[in-house]
Amino acid sequence: MSEGDKIQINLGDVLRLVLPLDTQVIASGPHTRRVINWITIMTHWRRIRAHIRADDIVLMSLEAQREMSDEEMTACLDKLAKLNAAALILFQDVSLMVKEAASRTDMPLLIVPGKVTLRDIHQGIAALLIDRRVQVNDRGMQLYRHLSEISRDGKGLAAMADVMSKLTGKIVVIQDKRLEFQAWSEPHNSPLDVAAVKSWLQERESLPKVLQNRKAAAKTRQTHWQQPLPFADATRLVTPIISGDRARGYLSIVGPTSEIDLLDAVCVEQGAAACALEMAKAKAISEAKKALRGNFLEGLLAGTLPLGEIERLSTRLDHNTAKPHAILVYAWDGASAPSLRRLETTLNWLSNEDQPLLVHIYGGTHICVFQTLRKDDLELAASFELDRRLREQVKAEMPDLSAHLIAGMYGPMEVLAEWPSAHHRALQAMQLGKKLRMNRLVEYNSLGIYRLLGQLESQSVVMQFCQQIIGPLVDYDRNHNSNLVQTIDAYFNHHGNISQTAESLFIHRNTLLYRLDRIQELTRQSLEQSDMRLALHLSLKLWQLRDKGESGG
């Protein structure tokens, strides 16, 4: 036995499964639940009683409609109402007088556009009455073709969501992989708390477990999931939007539990397939623009573009370069580091309209972030805030990550021509921050003497100077498992204050004095003499710039 034999067909089914989406409906009250038993074609209105039965849906041919005056059409509606007909379908618009009569007599009037024929409608309703499931599947394929046309016409996800919402009469939501809303459409009379629905949909835990892993979502054979909402008598149907080997987003249909049906399930499945095409197209366009930006930025930052070329090609960035900017550079440090592409995705997600980001993976080694600044942000507060949010997001997304971010920053830059030198300085800040184990965003201007020492550390005479003075302390610490290097570093950091230094090292004051005597003995440098104190301090700074793998580390 088919599903059509078991389930009563109503006017809402005809509207959703057979009639065009742009059908005009004139009705005074609730009409979608009117039961339909059969379909009757009316070629003349004077013999209505002989042909029409209760709960029939009536199709009036275009020829019969054209022969009727407004008064005759009004009388026809009155007779149909008395016979308890379900509705009247017309193929041409009618006057206001006829529409008012339809509302007054409570006879739903459905006016379909001229592009469809009486034969099409008759065949569709008859098929629905005989086998509802077949008609639902046919409607699903029609929907897929319609949504594909919308995508080809460049109307986007919002227009696609509107079509699906109109077809189902429910809330339709398209979200990206981070659950950000890409499109939202709802019927004007939705009984649900829209704000509560939006809040719940943005929680990753609201997704079925298998869909929370985007690769697993792409491999599962299940086509859609049905979930009750925790705060209302409502249900969500959700399907992953698959492109390639992973889910690129999610399509949901949300409505009262009692109204979720087979069409909604077919709609969410076919809609997700069409959305996948739209997202793939949008991604291809985005990648093409990104390649143009990347080629320009690579040449700009490498310093190979003359000023004239910089000005001529700057439009490729699709970014306002006339405003002040800061540059931040990021890289991973440590084993099992994620890809730079993943970090790039997170940064793009953190971008906002007020202070947009231009993000680029430079040479496959690090990420450059050009952040638009407000003119009064001379302290780069927005950049430090961006760094804080990025680290919080990375920790939330990858709580078990063993690698960590190293970062450098420089700014502000007023013009595009300053970007290459700013990039070099930010990169230098990141590299020095790594050597000094700062584990934070390092601003170039805060590095002080390290900027000079970083240029000198590789020279042999400087290395000999460092080894001669700080080397004995390093060797002593290694052989005796002591902390003399740490002690002298703390001493300088506290400007020679004995009490503060001892407190920072959690040792007694006398212990600190003993260590300082030992340091002076081993290095042959007196802390009482300014020149010797400076030599010891400089050699310590140079030693701190050593590579981690160097002996004495």
Image (tube, grey):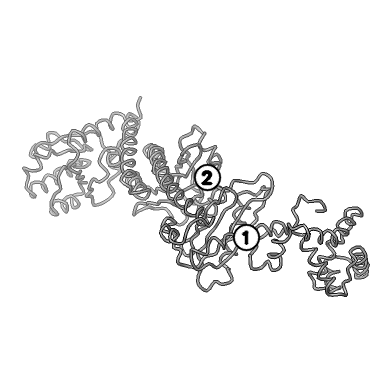
Looking at the image, which residue is at 50% across and 72% down?
375
What label sits on residue 408 in the rendered view?
1
Q: Is residue 540 left or right of residue 308?
A: right
Q: Residue furthest front?
A: 461
Q: Is residue 18 above or below residue 197?
A: above
Q: x, y percentage for residue 109? A: 20, 46
Decide: few, some or many residues near mark 1? Use Cα within 10 Å; few <14, some 14-19, many ≥20: many
| Label 2: few (<14), some (14–19) or many (≥20) C-alpha neighbours in 10 Å | some
Residue carrying label 2: 207
Q: Specify which label sits upstream in the sequence, 2 or 1.
A: 2
Q: Could you tell me which residue is drawn at 89 percent across and 64 percent down?
A: 523
Q: Is residue 279 left or right of residue 474?
A: left
Instruction: Report the side of 43 relative to 501 (left or right).
Output: left
Name the foreground residue: 531 vs 191: 531
**Which image quarter holds the N terminus?**
top left
Residue 100's image quarter?
bottom left
Q: Which mark is residue 75?
A: none
SS for callout 2? loop
Q: Are marks 2 and 1 in contact (CB under 8 Å)?
A: no
Q: Is residue 409 above or below residue 19?
A: below
Q: Position of residue 455 (x, y in %)?
A: 69, 61
Residue 314 in which image quadrant? bottom left
Q: Amino acid at mark 2?
A: Leu
In space, the residues marked 2 and 1 are separated at their CA atoms by: 37 Å
Residue 257, percent from left and from top: 43, 44
* Residue 357 image point, x, y percent: 50, 59
Task: Look at the image and tell me whether residue 230 can be seen.
Answer: yes
Q: Is residue 535 placed above or below 258 in the rendered structure? A: below
